[in-house]
Amino acid sequence: MLLKVFKDSIPLKASLVILFALCAYFMAPASMSEPSRRVFFIFVFSALFWALEIIPLYATSLLVILLETFFLCRPGGVMNMDSGGYKVFLLPFGSPIIILFLGGFILACAMQKYNIDRIIARRLLKLFGNKPYMIMLGFMMSTAFLSMWMSNTATTAMMIAMLLPLLKQIDPADPYRTGLILSIPFAANIGGIGTPVGTPPNAIAIGILANKGIYLNFISWMKMAFPLAVILIFATSVVLFVMYRPKTETIQLNIEFQKSFDRKTKMAMTIALLTVLLWLTSEIHKIPAAVIALTAAGLFAALGLLDRDDFKTIDWDVLVLMWGGLALGKGMEISGLTQWIVDLPLFEHTGFVLVAVFCLLGLLLSTFMSNTATANLLIPIVMVIPGENNILLAATVALSCSFAMALPVSTPPNAIAFATNMIHSKDMLKAGALISIISLLAVLLGFRLIVTAAFGIK
Protein backbone atom coordinates (compact mmCIF):
# COMPACT_ATOMS: atom_id res chain seq x y z
CA MET A 1 0.00 0.00 0.00
CA LEU A 2 2.76 2.45 0.99
CA LEU A 3 4.71 1.50 -2.13
CA LYS A 4 1.69 2.26 -4.32
CA VAL A 5 1.19 5.64 -2.64
CA PHE A 6 4.86 6.45 -3.20
CA LYS A 7 4.68 5.35 -6.83
CA ASP A 8 1.55 7.38 -7.62
CA SER A 9 2.38 10.55 -5.68
CA ILE A 10 4.71 12.88 -7.57
CA PRO A 11 4.85 15.48 -4.75
CA LEU A 12 5.80 12.77 -2.23
CA LYS A 13 8.54 11.37 -4.45
CA ALA A 14 9.87 14.84 -5.21
CA SER A 15 9.87 15.79 -1.53
CA LEU A 16 11.75 12.65 -0.50
CA VAL A 17 14.33 13.14 -3.25
CA ILE A 18 14.91 16.76 -2.26
CA LEU A 19 15.20 15.70 1.38
CA PHE A 20 17.73 13.03 0.45
CA ALA A 21 19.73 15.51 -1.65
CA LEU A 22 19.73 17.99 1.25
CA CYS A 23 21.02 15.25 3.56
CA ALA A 24 23.81 14.60 1.04
CA TYR A 25 24.63 18.32 1.10
CA PHE A 26 24.74 18.66 4.88
CA MET A 27 26.52 15.33 5.43
CA ALA A 28 29.19 15.98 2.78
CA PRO A 29 32.76 15.65 4.12
CA ALA A 30 34.44 18.76 5.51
CA SER A 31 37.13 18.42 2.85
CA MET A 32 34.56 19.39 0.22
CA SER A 33 34.39 23.11 -0.56
CA GLU A 34 31.09 24.99 -0.40
CA PRO A 35 30.70 25.22 -4.21
CA SER A 36 31.47 21.50 -4.46
CA ARG A 37 28.83 20.73 -1.83
CA ARG A 38 26.27 22.69 -3.81
CA VAL A 39 27.05 20.84 -7.03
CA PHE A 40 27.01 17.57 -5.09
CA PHE A 41 23.47 18.44 -4.02
CA ILE A 42 22.54 19.16 -7.65
CA PHE A 43 24.16 15.89 -8.78
CA VAL A 44 22.24 13.76 -6.26
CA PHE A 45 19.03 15.68 -6.99
CA SER A 46 19.33 15.21 -10.77
CA ALA A 47 20.44 11.58 -10.51
CA LEU A 48 17.33 10.60 -8.55
CA PHE A 49 14.97 12.75 -10.62
CA TRP A 50 16.33 11.24 -13.83
CA ALA A 51 16.31 7.69 -12.45
CA LEU A 52 12.78 7.87 -11.04
CA GLU A 53 11.43 10.09 -13.86
CA ILE A 54 9.46 12.10 -11.33
CA ILE A 55 9.08 14.80 -13.95
CA PRO A 56 10.02 14.63 -17.66
CA LEU A 57 13.74 14.11 -18.21
CA TYR A 58 14.16 17.40 -20.06
CA ALA A 59 12.44 19.23 -17.18
CA THR A 60 15.04 17.87 -14.78
CA SER A 61 17.77 19.15 -17.11
CA LEU A 62 16.26 22.63 -17.03
CA LEU A 63 16.18 22.47 -13.23
CA VAL A 64 19.87 21.46 -13.20
CA ILE A 65 20.77 24.56 -15.20
CA LEU A 66 18.57 26.77 -13.02
CA LEU A 67 20.03 25.38 -9.78
CA GLU A 68 23.59 25.77 -11.02
CA THR A 69 22.89 29.36 -12.00
CA PHE A 70 21.55 30.26 -8.56
CA PHE A 71 23.84 28.11 -6.41
CA LEU A 72 27.12 28.86 -8.18
CA CYS A 73 26.61 32.39 -9.47
CA ARG A 74 25.09 34.00 -6.38
CA PRO A 75 27.30 35.22 -3.48
CA GLY A 76 29.13 32.25 -2.02
CA GLY A 77 29.34 30.50 -5.34
CA VAL A 78 32.34 30.42 -7.64
CA MET A 79 31.17 33.08 -10.11
CA ASN A 80 29.58 36.49 -9.95
CA MET A 81 26.15 36.77 -11.58
CA ASP A 82 26.83 40.42 -12.47
CA SER A 83 29.91 39.51 -14.50
CA GLY A 84 27.94 37.13 -16.68
CA GLY A 85 29.30 33.97 -15.08
CA TYR A 86 25.91 32.33 -15.43
CA LYS A 87 26.45 32.21 -19.20
CA VAL A 88 28.80 29.25 -18.80
CA PHE A 89 25.71 27.10 -18.11
CA LEU A 90 23.73 28.55 -21.02
CA LEU A 91 26.46 28.21 -23.64
CA PRO A 92 26.29 24.39 -23.98
CA PHE A 93 22.91 24.65 -25.74
CA GLY A 94 24.66 26.45 -28.59
CA SER A 95 27.74 24.24 -28.50
CA PRO A 96 28.91 22.49 -31.68
CA ILE A 97 27.81 19.07 -30.44
CA ILE A 98 24.22 20.22 -29.79
CA ILE A 99 24.12 21.89 -33.22
CA LEU A 100 25.49 18.70 -34.78
CA PHE A 101 22.79 16.62 -33.12
CA LEU A 102 20.11 19.15 -34.16
CA GLY A 103 21.34 18.84 -37.74
CA GLY A 104 21.18 15.06 -37.40
CA PHE A 105 17.56 15.28 -36.25
CA ILE A 106 16.68 17.55 -39.19
CA LEU A 107 18.43 15.19 -41.63
CA ALA A 108 16.50 12.24 -40.17
CA CYS A 109 13.25 14.22 -40.43
CA ALA A 110 13.86 14.80 -44.14
CA MET A 111 14.78 11.15 -44.71
CA GLN A 112 11.51 10.05 -43.13
CA LYS A 113 9.36 12.64 -44.90
CA TYR A 114 10.62 11.69 -48.35
CA ASN A 115 10.92 7.94 -47.60
CA ILE A 116 14.67 8.00 -48.17
CA ASP A 117 15.05 5.62 -45.24
CA ARG A 118 12.74 3.07 -46.89
CA ILE A 119 14.52 3.44 -50.21
CA ILE A 120 17.88 2.73 -48.57
CA ALA A 121 16.51 -0.21 -46.55
CA ARG A 122 14.96 -1.87 -49.61
CA ARG A 123 18.14 -1.48 -51.64
CA LEU A 124 20.23 -2.98 -48.86
CA LEU A 125 17.87 -5.88 -48.13
CA LYS A 126 17.87 -6.94 -51.78
CA LEU A 127 21.61 -7.66 -51.54
CA PHE A 128 21.25 -10.42 -48.94
CA GLY A 129 19.37 -13.15 -50.82
CA ASN A 130 16.75 -15.53 -49.43
CA LYS A 131 18.62 -17.71 -46.91
CA PRO A 132 17.31 -17.30 -43.33
CA TYR A 133 20.64 -16.21 -41.85
CA MET A 134 21.33 -13.75 -44.66
CA ILE A 135 17.83 -12.28 -44.34
CA MET A 136 18.37 -11.75 -40.61
CA LEU A 137 21.78 -10.23 -41.26
CA GLY A 138 20.28 -8.05 -44.00
CA PHE A 139 17.62 -6.65 -41.69
CA MET A 140 20.22 -6.07 -38.98
CA MET A 141 22.70 -4.35 -41.31
CA SER A 142 19.98 -2.14 -42.78
CA THR A 143 18.66 -1.23 -39.34
CA ALA A 144 22.12 -0.53 -37.96
CA PHE A 145 23.08 1.63 -40.93
CA LEU A 146 19.93 3.75 -40.69
CA SER A 147 20.21 4.12 -36.91
CA MET A 148 23.66 5.63 -37.41
CA TRP A 149 21.95 8.65 -38.97
CA MET A 150 18.39 8.56 -37.64
CA SER A 151 16.60 8.08 -34.36
CA ASN A 152 16.87 4.48 -33.15
CA THR A 153 13.17 4.62 -32.33
CA ALA A 154 12.07 5.77 -35.79
CA THR A 155 14.37 3.27 -37.47
CA THR A 156 13.00 0.38 -35.41
CA ALA A 157 9.39 1.36 -36.08
CA MET A 158 10.02 1.48 -39.84
CA MET A 159 12.01 -1.77 -40.00
CA ILE A 160 9.46 -3.65 -37.87
CA ALA A 161 6.76 -2.48 -40.30
CA MET A 162 8.84 -3.81 -43.21
CA LEU A 163 9.41 -7.09 -41.38
CA LEU A 164 5.75 -7.86 -40.60
CA PRO A 165 4.77 -9.01 -44.15
CA LEU A 166 7.73 -11.41 -44.11
CA LEU A 167 6.67 -12.86 -40.75
CA LYS A 168 3.34 -13.91 -42.26
CA GLN A 169 5.23 -16.43 -44.41
CA ILE A 170 6.79 -18.08 -41.36
CA ASP A 171 5.07 -20.66 -39.15
CA PRO A 172 4.09 -19.01 -35.81
CA ALA A 173 5.73 -21.97 -34.05
CA ASP A 174 9.05 -21.35 -35.81
CA PRO A 175 11.52 -19.83 -33.30
CA TYR A 176 13.11 -17.94 -36.19
CA ARG A 177 10.24 -15.43 -35.99
CA THR A 178 11.33 -14.48 -32.48
CA GLY A 179 14.93 -14.10 -33.58
CA LEU A 180 13.96 -11.86 -36.49
CA ILE A 181 11.89 -9.53 -34.32
CA LEU A 182 14.61 -9.28 -31.66
CA SER A 183 17.23 -8.58 -34.32
CA ILE A 184 15.67 -5.21 -35.20
CA PRO A 185 15.87 -3.40 -31.81
CA PHE A 186 19.24 -4.98 -31.00
CA ALA A 187 20.66 -3.79 -34.34
CA ALA A 188 19.21 -0.31 -33.80
CA ASN A 189 20.84 -0.07 -30.38
CA ILE A 190 24.20 -1.25 -31.70
CA GLY A 191 24.10 0.79 -34.91
CA GLY A 192 23.56 3.99 -32.96
CA ILE A 193 27.09 3.86 -31.58
CA GLY A 194 28.64 4.19 -35.04
CA THR A 195 28.41 7.96 -35.52
CA PRO A 196 28.29 11.04 -33.26
CA VAL A 197 24.65 11.64 -34.26
CA GLY A 198 23.58 8.01 -33.76
CA THR A 199 22.61 8.27 -30.10
CA PRO A 200 22.84 11.00 -27.41
CA PRO A 201 25.50 9.33 -25.19
CA ASN A 202 27.95 9.64 -28.10
CA ALA A 203 27.33 13.37 -28.29
CA ILE A 204 27.59 13.77 -24.51
CA ALA A 205 30.99 12.07 -24.52
CA ILE A 206 32.21 14.30 -27.37
CA GLY A 207 30.85 17.41 -25.64
CA ILE A 208 32.52 16.62 -22.31
CA LEU A 209 35.79 15.86 -24.09
CA ALA A 210 35.50 19.26 -25.80
CA ASN A 211 35.17 20.91 -22.38
CA LYS A 212 38.59 19.44 -21.61
CA GLY A 213 40.07 20.73 -24.86
CA ILE A 214 39.94 17.37 -26.66
CA TYR A 215 38.09 17.71 -29.96
CA LEU A 216 36.85 14.70 -31.90
CA ASN A 217 35.54 15.29 -35.40
CA PHE A 218 32.92 13.15 -37.10
CA ILE A 219 35.29 10.70 -38.73
CA SER A 220 37.42 10.41 -35.58
CA TRP A 221 34.46 8.99 -33.68
CA MET A 222 33.62 6.66 -36.57
CA LYS A 223 37.19 5.36 -36.71
CA MET A 224 36.85 3.93 -33.23
CA ALA A 225 33.12 3.14 -32.97
CA PHE A 226 32.14 1.96 -36.45
CA PRO A 227 34.42 -1.14 -36.46
CA LEU A 228 33.03 -2.13 -33.07
CA ALA A 229 29.46 -1.72 -34.35
CA VAL A 230 30.16 -3.96 -37.35
CA ILE A 231 31.76 -6.63 -35.17
CA LEU A 232 28.84 -6.58 -32.74
CA ILE A 233 26.24 -6.77 -35.51
CA PHE A 234 27.85 -9.95 -36.84
CA ALA A 235 28.23 -11.38 -33.32
CA THR A 236 24.60 -10.59 -32.47
CA SER A 237 23.32 -12.11 -35.71
CA VAL A 238 25.19 -15.35 -34.95
CA VAL A 239 23.90 -15.46 -31.36
CA LEU A 240 20.28 -14.89 -32.43
CA PHE A 241 20.50 -17.38 -35.30
CA VAL A 242 21.92 -20.08 -33.03
CA MET A 243 19.34 -19.39 -30.30
CA TYR A 244 16.39 -19.24 -32.72
CA ARG A 245 17.22 -21.63 -35.54
CA PRO A 246 14.74 -21.61 -38.46
CA LYS A 247 12.74 -24.63 -39.55
CA THR A 248 12.91 -23.64 -43.22
CA GLU A 249 15.90 -23.32 -45.54
CA THR A 250 14.69 -20.50 -47.79
CA ILE A 251 12.32 -17.57 -47.43
CA GLN A 252 10.96 -15.46 -50.25
CA LEU A 253 11.65 -11.79 -49.63
CA ASN A 254 9.46 -9.68 -51.93
CA ILE A 255 10.83 -6.17 -52.29
CA GLU A 256 9.52 -3.54 -54.69
CA PHE A 257 11.72 -0.66 -55.74
CA GLN A 258 10.48 2.86 -56.34
CA LYS A 259 11.70 3.67 -59.85
CA SER A 260 10.94 7.40 -60.10
CA PHE A 261 11.16 10.28 -57.65
CA ASP A 262 9.66 13.75 -57.66
CA ARG A 263 11.79 16.90 -57.64
CA LYS A 264 11.66 17.48 -53.88
CA THR A 265 12.65 13.89 -53.12
CA LYS A 266 15.65 14.19 -55.45
CA MET A 267 16.65 17.46 -53.75
CA ALA A 268 16.34 15.91 -50.28
CA MET A 269 18.37 12.87 -51.34
CA THR A 270 21.10 15.11 -52.79
CA ILE A 271 21.37 17.22 -49.63
CA ALA A 272 21.39 14.12 -47.40
CA LEU A 273 24.10 12.44 -49.51
CA LEU A 274 26.28 15.56 -49.60
CA THR A 275 25.88 16.03 -45.84
CA VAL A 276 27.04 12.50 -45.07
CA LEU A 277 29.92 12.74 -47.56
CA LEU A 278 31.09 16.03 -46.04
CA TRP A 279 30.92 14.50 -42.54
CA LEU A 280 32.96 11.51 -43.68
CA THR A 281 35.63 13.67 -45.34
CA SER A 282 35.91 16.29 -42.58
CA GLU A 283 39.59 15.48 -42.03
CA ILE A 284 40.30 16.55 -45.62
CA HIS A 285 38.32 19.79 -45.96
CA LYS A 286 38.44 20.73 -42.23
CA ILE A 287 34.85 22.04 -42.19
CA PRO A 288 33.44 21.42 -38.67
CA ALA A 289 30.69 18.79 -38.52
CA ALA A 290 28.38 21.26 -36.76
CA VAL A 291 28.74 23.75 -39.64
CA ILE A 292 27.93 21.00 -42.14
CA ALA A 293 24.86 20.04 -40.10
CA LEU A 294 23.74 23.67 -39.88
CA THR A 295 24.19 24.12 -43.64
CA ALA A 296 22.04 21.06 -44.35
CA ALA A 297 19.37 22.28 -41.93
CA GLY A 298 19.36 25.68 -43.61
CA LEU A 299 19.01 24.16 -47.07
CA PHE A 300 16.14 21.88 -46.04
CA ALA A 301 14.30 24.90 -44.62
CA ALA A 302 15.18 27.49 -47.29
CA LEU A 303 14.27 25.21 -50.20
CA GLY A 304 10.89 24.38 -48.67
CA LEU A 305 11.70 20.72 -48.17
CA LEU A 306 10.81 20.94 -44.47
CA ASP A 307 8.13 23.23 -43.09
CA ARG A 308 7.14 24.50 -39.67
CA ASP A 309 5.18 21.36 -38.84
CA ASP A 310 8.19 19.20 -39.68
CA PHE A 311 10.40 21.18 -37.32
CA LYS A 312 7.85 20.66 -34.55
CA THR A 313 8.42 16.90 -34.78
CA ILE A 314 12.12 17.21 -33.92
CA ASP A 315 13.08 15.78 -30.52
CA TRP A 316 13.84 19.11 -28.87
CA ASP A 317 13.47 17.46 -25.46
CA VAL A 318 16.50 15.26 -26.21
CA LEU A 319 18.59 18.34 -26.98
CA VAL A 320 17.53 19.92 -23.68
CA LEU A 321 18.36 16.69 -21.85
CA MET A 322 21.84 16.73 -23.39
CA TRP A 323 22.20 20.42 -22.49
CA GLY A 324 21.52 19.60 -18.85
CA GLY A 325 24.16 16.88 -18.87
CA LEU A 326 26.82 19.12 -20.40
CA ALA A 327 25.98 21.89 -17.92
CA LEU A 328 26.18 19.44 -15.01
CA GLY A 329 29.63 18.32 -16.14
CA LYS A 330 30.74 21.93 -16.41
CA GLY A 331 29.42 22.68 -12.93
CA MET A 332 31.30 19.71 -11.46
CA GLU A 333 34.49 20.96 -13.09
CA ILE A 334 34.38 24.66 -12.10
CA SER A 335 33.16 23.97 -8.57
CA GLY A 336 36.09 21.66 -7.86
CA LEU A 337 33.90 18.59 -7.33
CA THR A 338 35.73 16.60 -10.00
CA GLN A 339 39.08 17.39 -8.36
CA TRP A 340 37.67 16.33 -4.98
CA ILE A 341 36.61 13.02 -6.54
CA VAL A 342 40.10 12.57 -8.01
CA ASP A 343 41.59 12.91 -4.52
CA LEU A 344 39.40 10.12 -3.08
CA PRO A 345 41.30 6.97 -2.00
CA LEU A 346 39.16 4.96 -4.42
CA PHE A 347 40.80 6.73 -7.36
CA GLU A 348 44.30 5.97 -6.15
CA HIS A 349 43.76 2.45 -7.48
CA THR A 350 43.39 3.35 -11.11
CA GLY A 351 43.28 1.36 -14.26
CA PHE A 352 41.20 -1.19 -16.06
CA VAL A 353 39.21 -2.51 -13.09
CA LEU A 354 37.82 0.91 -12.14
CA VAL A 355 36.88 1.66 -15.75
CA ALA A 356 35.18 -1.74 -15.96
CA VAL A 357 33.15 -0.96 -12.83
CA PHE A 358 31.86 2.29 -14.34
CA CYS A 359 31.05 0.58 -17.64
CA LEU A 360 29.11 -2.13 -15.83
CA LEU A 361 27.32 0.53 -13.79
CA GLY A 362 26.43 2.36 -17.01
CA LEU A 363 25.00 -0.83 -18.50
CA LEU A 364 22.96 -1.65 -15.38
CA LEU A 365 21.58 1.87 -14.93
CA SER A 366 20.65 2.13 -18.62
CA THR A 367 18.67 -1.08 -18.30
CA PHE A 368 16.16 0.73 -16.10
CA MET A 369 16.55 4.42 -17.00
CA SER A 370 17.37 6.65 -19.95
CA ASN A 371 20.80 5.98 -21.44
CA THR A 372 21.16 9.73 -22.04
CA ALA A 373 20.56 10.49 -18.36
CA THR A 374 22.98 7.72 -17.37
CA ALA A 375 25.67 9.15 -19.62
CA ASN A 376 25.00 12.62 -18.18
CA LEU A 377 25.77 11.29 -14.70
CA LEU A 378 28.65 8.88 -15.27
CA ILE A 379 30.85 10.41 -17.96
CA PRO A 380 31.84 13.53 -15.95
CA ILE A 381 32.82 11.28 -13.04
CA VAL A 382 34.75 8.68 -15.03
CA MET A 383 36.74 11.41 -16.79
CA VAL A 384 38.65 12.12 -13.57
CA ILE A 385 40.20 8.64 -13.36
CA PRO A 386 43.96 9.27 -13.54
CA GLY A 387 46.28 7.12 -15.59
CA GLU A 388 43.77 6.49 -18.37
CA ASN A 389 43.32 8.24 -21.72
CA ASN A 390 40.37 10.66 -21.69
CA ILE A 391 39.07 9.49 -25.07
CA LEU A 392 39.02 5.89 -23.86
CA LEU A 393 37.27 6.86 -20.63
CA ALA A 394 34.51 8.91 -22.24
CA ALA A 395 33.92 6.56 -25.16
CA THR A 396 33.86 3.29 -23.21
CA VAL A 397 31.29 4.55 -20.72
CA ALA A 398 29.19 6.22 -23.43
CA LEU A 399 29.08 3.02 -25.47
CA SER A 400 28.30 0.90 -22.40
CA CYS A 401 25.23 3.07 -21.81
CA SER A 402 23.94 2.06 -25.26
CA PHE A 403 24.15 -1.70 -24.71
CA ALA A 404 21.24 -2.19 -22.30
CA MET A 405 18.94 -4.57 -24.19
CA ALA A 406 17.63 -7.03 -21.62
CA LEU A 407 14.18 -5.58 -20.89
CA PRO A 408 11.34 -3.98 -22.88
CA VAL A 409 11.83 -0.80 -20.82
CA SER A 410 15.57 -0.65 -21.48
CA THR A 411 15.26 1.25 -24.76
CA PRO A 412 12.43 2.56 -26.99
CA PRO A 413 13.42 0.10 -29.78
CA ASN A 414 12.97 -2.79 -27.33
CA ALA A 415 9.56 -1.44 -26.34
CA ILE A 416 8.46 -1.19 -29.99
CA ALA A 417 9.49 -4.79 -30.69
CA PHE A 418 7.77 -6.03 -27.54
CA ALA A 419 4.59 -4.14 -28.52
CA THR A 420 4.16 -6.44 -31.54
CA ASN A 421 2.99 -9.12 -29.07
CA MET A 422 5.03 -11.66 -31.04
CA ILE A 423 7.78 -12.10 -28.46
CA HIS A 424 7.87 -12.79 -24.73
CA SER A 425 9.80 -10.73 -22.21
CA LYS A 426 11.77 -13.86 -21.25
CA ASP A 427 13.07 -14.09 -24.83
CA MET A 428 14.24 -10.49 -24.72
CA LEU A 429 15.81 -11.03 -21.30
CA LYS A 430 17.64 -14.20 -22.34
CA ALA A 431 18.98 -12.92 -25.65
CA GLY A 432 19.35 -9.28 -24.62
CA ALA A 433 21.31 -10.03 -21.46
CA LEU A 434 23.73 -12.28 -23.35
CA ILE A 435 24.28 -9.70 -26.10
CA SER A 436 24.69 -6.92 -23.52
CA ILE A 437 27.44 -8.93 -21.80
CA ILE A 438 29.16 -9.69 -25.12
CA SER A 439 28.98 -5.99 -26.06
CA LEU A 440 30.36 -4.90 -22.70
CA LEU A 441 33.28 -7.32 -22.98
CA ALA A 442 33.95 -6.12 -26.52
CA VAL A 443 34.06 -2.52 -25.29
CA LEU A 444 36.37 -3.33 -22.39
CA LEU A 445 38.73 -5.58 -24.32
CA GLY A 446 38.64 -5.18 -28.09
CA PHE A 447 37.55 -1.54 -28.15
CA ARG A 448 40.70 -0.42 -26.37
CA LEU A 449 42.73 -1.99 -29.18
CA ILE A 450 40.63 -0.23 -31.82
CA VAL A 451 41.01 3.18 -30.17
CA THR A 452 44.73 2.62 -29.68
CA ALA A 453 45.10 1.91 -33.39
CA ALA A 454 42.86 4.81 -34.43
CA PHE A 455 44.55 7.48 -32.32
CA GLY A 456 48.00 6.07 -31.66
CA ILE A 457 47.31 5.95 -27.91
CA LYS A 458 49.88 4.09 -25.85
Image: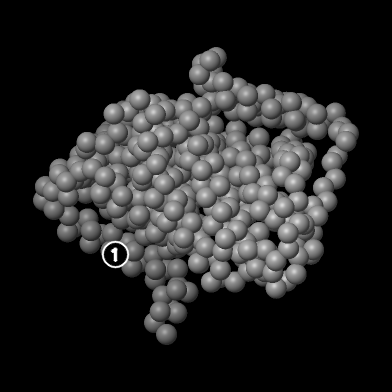
* Residue 309 seen by the camera: no
10 Å neighbourhood of mark 1: few (<14), some, or many (≥20)?
few
**Residue 197 against residue 19 in the figure, above or below:** above
In-front residue for pair 311/256? 256
Q: Residue drawn at (54%, 57%), measured in percent from left and top? A: 239
**Residue 27 against residue 282 in the figure, above or below:** below
Tell me the quarter of the picture where residue 267 sits: top right
Residue named by callout 1: 19
Render colour scheme = one colour
Q: Residue drawn at (46%, 60%), measured in percent from left and top? A: 434
> In the rendering, at what x and y percent does residue 227 appear?
50, 37
**Residue 194 against residue 11 in the figure, above or below:** above
Left or right: residue 238 compared with residue 296: left
Left or right: residue 458 compared with residue 319: left
Q: Amino acid at mark 1?
A: Leu
Q: Quadrant of the N terminus?
A: bottom left
* Residue at the extreme top of the image, as rendered: 285
In-front residue for pair 366/242? 242
**Secondary structure state at the residue bearing disc 1:** helix
> In the rendering, at what x and y percent does residue 137 appear?
64, 49
